[in-house]
Amino acid sequence: QVQLVESGGGLVQAGVSLRLSCVASGRTVSSSAMAWFRQAHGKEREFVAAISRTGFSLYYADSVKGRFTISRDNAKNTVYLQMNSLKPEDTAIYYCAARISGVASITPTYDYWGQGTQVTVSS
């Protein structure tokens, strides 16, 4: 079993930055591919960013490319999502996910999910 706990969300104004963290327990992050998805109110969950087990493969949704950066610190069993130049349309609950195969995917075919952290961006 893997437990994922997200943190770092909040209410911010457009243009600022936030960094989300996802701490894993029960299994090391280093052996899993990790991803961030988000779900806005009334919308389906959508892919944001993913990083392979090795960290060599990174994937981003077009809507966040150039603004968001996913990274991992295996020593801390933590994955991060650095979000810069936030926009009101980034408002959503952000979920961390782990895929034990180690291969990153942009589809929600992940084995474990966190409870999410709310990000609200005001204009």
Image (cartoon, rainbow, N blue to C red):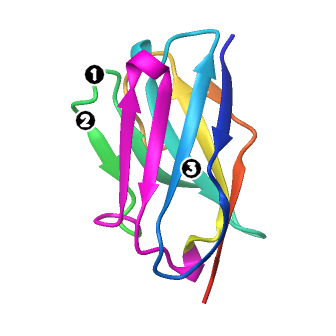
Label 1: which secondary element:
loop
Q: Position of residue 16 (x, y in %)?
A: 48, 74
Furthest toward the bottom, the residue is: 123
Furthest toward the left, the residue is: 56
Q: What numbered label is drawn on residue 39?
A: none
Residue beneath the point at 64% across and 26% down: 112
Contact (Cβ within 8 Å) of mark 1 with mark 3: no
Badge 3 crowding class, 10 Å Cα cut-off, few under 14, some 14 to 19, many 20 or more, is many
Q: CA distance from mark 1 to mark 3?
A: 20 Å
Badge 1 crowding class, 10 Å Cα cut-off, few under 14, some 14 to 19, many 20 or more, is some
Contact (Cβ within 8 Å) of mark 1 with mark 2: yes
Task: Identify the residue position indicated by label 1 in the image.
Answer: 54
The answer to whether residue 56 is above or below residue 28 is below
Amino acid carrying label 1: it is: Thr
The answer to whether residue 18 is above or below residue 58 is below
- Which quarter shows the N terminus? top right
Q: Horizontal placement of 73 versus 58: left or right?
A: right
Q: Horizontal placement of 43 versus 35: left or right?
A: right
Residue beneath the point at 40% across and 20% down: 74
Q: CA distance from mark 3 to mark 2?
A: 17 Å
Badge 2 crowding class, 10 Å Cα cut-off, few under 14, some 14 to 19, many 20 or more, is few
- Which quarter shows the C terminus? bottom right
User: Splitting the image into 4 quarters, where does residue 11 fall?
Assistant: bottom right
The magenta span reads 64-89
Q: Earlier in the sequence, mark 3 or mark 2?
A: 3
